[in-house]
Image: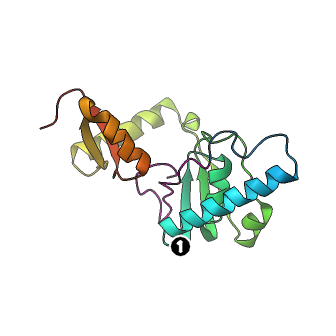
Amino acid sequence: AQGGAGGTGSRGDQGGAGGAGSRGGHGGAGGRGSAVGREAGVAALAARLAAACDGPVDLVLDPLFGLPAAAAARTLRPSGRLVNLGSSAGETSPLDSATLRSRSLRVLGYTNNELSREQRAAAMGRIAELAAQGRLRVAHEAVPLSEIAPAWERQSAGTTSGRLVVTPRPGP
């Protein structure tokens, strides 16, 4: 999951990618200079992702799109899948045709908006059931509100594991 802390997918986690996909970071009026810079950004981020994942991955769950999706596509092994879930890094992505074709990649889109009210209710019920049974766990760290600044610094540095949950009460 790009930008997330969890391990979603089969070796396809993109957490820790940093801010390379910030909105507008690869766009502009277009000229050759911006295309060269965009390609360098995609290549650099792809190298970081591949190193973080210990090599090619089968699946990418992508809530970012934009430049991070183009980089993530380069980390996929042949016949890999990139599932787009959102576009917080950009509405368009510089995915290149050569990457898609040379690896026979699949790019899919997903939205919960296609689910009926009944399907959503059933899914949420199942999630609640698994959580109540202790079979669904989210890696997290409870952080007292009084310690939020250093916690955010650790999160920014990439040294937290899981989600930070801010609590209004002092720590133990």
Task: Say if the magenta span includes residue 8.
Answer: yes
Above or below, 123 against 62 in this view is above
Q: Main secondary structure of the magenta part?
A: loop
Label 1 belongs to which residue? 55
Q: Which residues are magenta?
A: 1-20
Image point 43% across, 45% down: which residue?
156
Task: Point out residue 115 in the picture as x, y percentages from the top left corner.
Answer: 54, 36
Residue 112 or 35: which is nearer the viewer?
35
Total numbered labels placed on residues in the image: 1
Q: Which of the 4 image quadrants contains residue 121? A: top left
Residue 120 or 23: which is nearer the viewer?
23
Above or below, 48 against 63 in this view is below
Task: Point out residue 99 in the picture as x, y percentages from the top left corner.
Answer: 73, 66
Task: Point out residue 86 in the picture as x, y percentages from the top left corner.
Answer: 59, 41
Residue 167 or 112: which is nearer the viewer?
167
Q: Please identify the quadrant where the C terminus is shown.
A: top left
Image point 41% across, 57% down: which residue?
7
Task: Point out residue 69 in the picture as x, y percentages from the top left corner.
Answer: 64, 53
Q: Secondary structure at mark 1?
A: loop
Above or below, 101 against 108 in this view is below
**Can the viewer see residue 122?**
yes
